Amino acid sequence: MIRMESVTKRYPDGTVAVDRLSLEIPDRSITVLVGPSGCGKTTTLRMINRMVEPSEGRILLDGVDIRRQPVNALRRSMGYVIQNAGLFPHRTVVDNIATVPRLLGWSRRRARARAAELMERVGLDASLGRRYPYQLSGGQQQRVGVARALAADPPVLLMDEPFSAVDPVVRKGLQDELLRIQDELGKTIVFVTHDIDEAVRLGTRVAVLRAGGRLAQCAPPAELLAAPADAFVEDFLGADRGIRRLSFLPSGGLPLQKSPVVTADCTAEQIAARAAPGLPYLLVTDRDGRPLGWGEPEALLAGPPDPARLLPHGRPFEYGSDSLRAALDGAVLSPTGWAVAVDGTGRVLGVVSQQTIGEAVRSAHAGSRTAAGSWDRVAG
């Protein structure tokens, strides 16, 4: 565990970047530091590996003051990932990743073998090992940066806005990769971001800092969204924090309807039997049960459906694994207002209406008033 006790950073001109910050960072967790520009997030991160020395207070690593360790040894025991990866331009990908092991005295062969292993772990093709950073995309460079930080298997990983310079699609992929790696390795990660969506998605705990480097609130994401400590935290979370909160409510309890689902080769009798007065469309699937789109019963009775003429089915959600936010998103994107629930293989389990999802949301919120913060974390 990392414990910060009344840590202050004051510069010679009198500027206070961090003000009496006390914070516990649990082992094998992702603690995210978030807040407005200039609130001391990066300064706090850099004090953990003594790139910045605190003016007051102390930082303990597993109960030991970090100032008792030689600074170089401390830094080599912590992985460090920054925006734009910070790779050495004159070294190949493999040699970039092998940097810290080589500094620790590993042989070139052992260090490069470790680099190859980590390339696979972070989703990089082995053929990229001989390339130089300028020959990689931004997302690939960030993966190399993560691999380099993990090379010596440090227990602590410090990440300073590592994904902020890439586009949203690549960013989500890198976030997914980080969560997967964390599930496998269980590092103690301190992650700095200015993006509250990223903080809520990645964090086991989220520490919100206010201007002047003071801690406003530190809590699990679901608790933070449900009960902001004050008006500053509420404003920082944004007007759509209720939608974000749905990411922590599971979809597994939603009642699904199977009757409006037909296969493309079903008979006229089956179509007539499944048509319902309250639902003017039927969901058509292929023979394997994967969704093709929505069709009107009358049109389906006229002959085999043309997939190109079906209404889009929106974005399916994986029942039980995805959250209520994903289910609601699927319903909103569907022209019928119904979301399609699928299993892990993409086969349709049933459909659910916006109204039913809304009832589930209201029920979950009512229950949360007596058990705030008790929901299991569900990936949205």
Image (tube, rainbow, N blue to C red):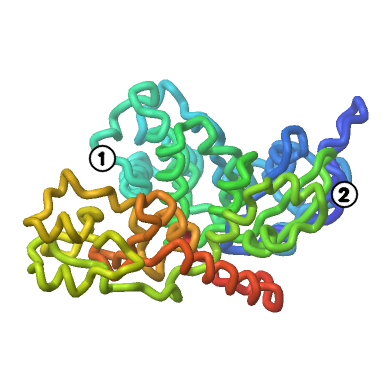
* Whole-number angstrom distance, CA of label 2 to CA of label 1: 46 Å
Q: Which residue is located at x 45 percent, y 76 percent?
A: 253
Q: Is residue 255 left or right of residue 154?
A: left
Q: Earlier in the sequence, mark 2 or mark 1?
A: 2
- Residue 3 visible at all: no
Q: Quadrant of residue 127?
A: top left
Q: Is residue 290 above or below residue 35?
A: below
Q: Is residue 362 left or right of residue 125?
A: right
Q: Say whether residue 273 is visible.
A: yes
- Given residues 238 and 177, the one toward you in this image is 238
Q: Position of residue 118 (x, y in %)?
A: 36, 47
Which residue is outermost to the right?
A: 14
Residue 141: where, in percent of width, then height?
41, 32
Residue at the spot of label 2: 20
From the viewer's perspective, tell me whether residue 169 is left or right of residue 222: left
Between residue 55 and residue 244, name the one nearer to us. Answer: 244
Query: Which residue in the structure is indicated by mark 1?
Result: 126
Q: Position of residue 256 (x, y in %)?
A: 36, 73
